[in-house]
Image (cartoon, rainbow, N blue to C red):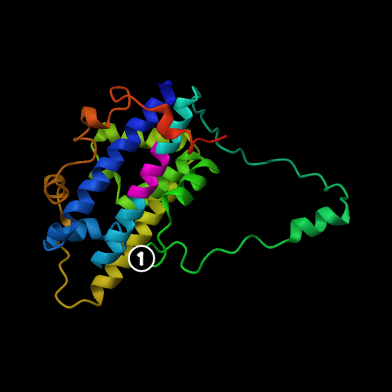
Amino acid sequence: MPARIATLLHTVRILLGFGRHLAETAKQRAASPDFNAIAACFGTGRLYAILAHLQRGILRATALERVLLARAARGRDIGFVAPRERATATPAAPAEQPAEAQVARKAPPPSRPAHWNDPELFMPTLEELEAQVRRRPLGRTLVDICLDLAVVPGFCTGPFWNELFDSIRLHGGSVAALMQEKARRQKAFCQEQDRKPGSNWDWLEMGREARRRVLGFFIGEAAEDSFDPVVEPYAPAAALATGPP
């Protein structure tokens, strides 16, 4: 198993294990007033919206896992993505191009289905998500997984958050974008609660152990051998159709 793939797979499988756990227990946990601490990370207390995000997050994590295993089956590791540097010099004037190139540049981007980013209304297939994983930085997929599975620093063990932070940063993702969306969703959830009579705001003052009880465990605590790609063998034959070119 290539070393960098093994490290990233370890992170992905912990996320996948947590997502499956939360999806299996969300209906029971939603009856607790403390569940608002989790719901706030989705921006809504509507259970069906939360379950849709969890389903898509599990699919995203599975797609990333399959792409990584396919690459490992070919004996290819993954590289790190250097952060983009801002240009400081004045850009040179673009060279004159043929008319055909100018027409191509002005062509509108392919249209997306209506509500394409709302998992309640449009659930992508595993194959579509695998294709998305292959065409963009892996760190962006990690950020999307975190958003779909309600993964935030306060729900993680310290060592696992550090591991996840590095995985996002080193593979072209933005932790800042993750935290900005977290803040936006919390604001949206608060606005939703303002319209709901008898809303419980105790979740804003919950301590660490209270959060642990509503989650079941902190993300990273249940990192058993079943999530460990170094211990678990990988099957090249099962991954041939999903690997990047």
Tell me: 67 left or right of 12: right
Q: Nearer the viewer, residue 36 or 51?
A: 51
Asked whether residue 99 is in view, the answer is yes
Q: Residue at x 29, y 56 (%)?
A: 41
Q: Residues within 10 Å of mark 1 (few under 14, many from 20)?
A: some
Q: Position of residue 136 (x, y in %)?
A: 54, 43
Q: Position of residue 111 (x, y in %)?
A: 59, 64
Looking at the image, how many numbered discs can be counted on the residues?
A: 1
The boundaries of the magenta stretch are 58-65
Q: Nearer the viewer, residue 180 or 242?
A: 242
Rendering quarter of residue 123: bottom left
Q: Which quadrant of the figure contains the N terminus? A: top left
Looking at the image, residue 197 lies above or below residue 104: below
Q: Residue at x 55, y 36 (%)?
A: 83
| Most frequent secondary structure within the magenta stretch | helix
Q: Position of residue 220 (x, y in %)?
A: 23, 36
Tell me: 112 left or right of 117: right
Q: Residue at x 35, y 50 (%)?
A: 57
Asked whether residue 154 is in view, the answer is no
Q: Nearer the viewer, residue 100 or 202?
A: 100
Q: Position of residue 184 (x, y in %)?
A: 37, 61
Residue 44 in the magenta stretch? The answer is: no
Residue beneath disc 1: 120
Rendering quarter of residue 90: top right
Q: Which quadrant of the figure contains the C terminus? A: top right
> Under tag 1, what secondary structure?
loop
Tell me: 88 left or right of 9: right
Residue type at mark 1 is Glu
Residue 61 in the magenta stretch? The answer is: yes
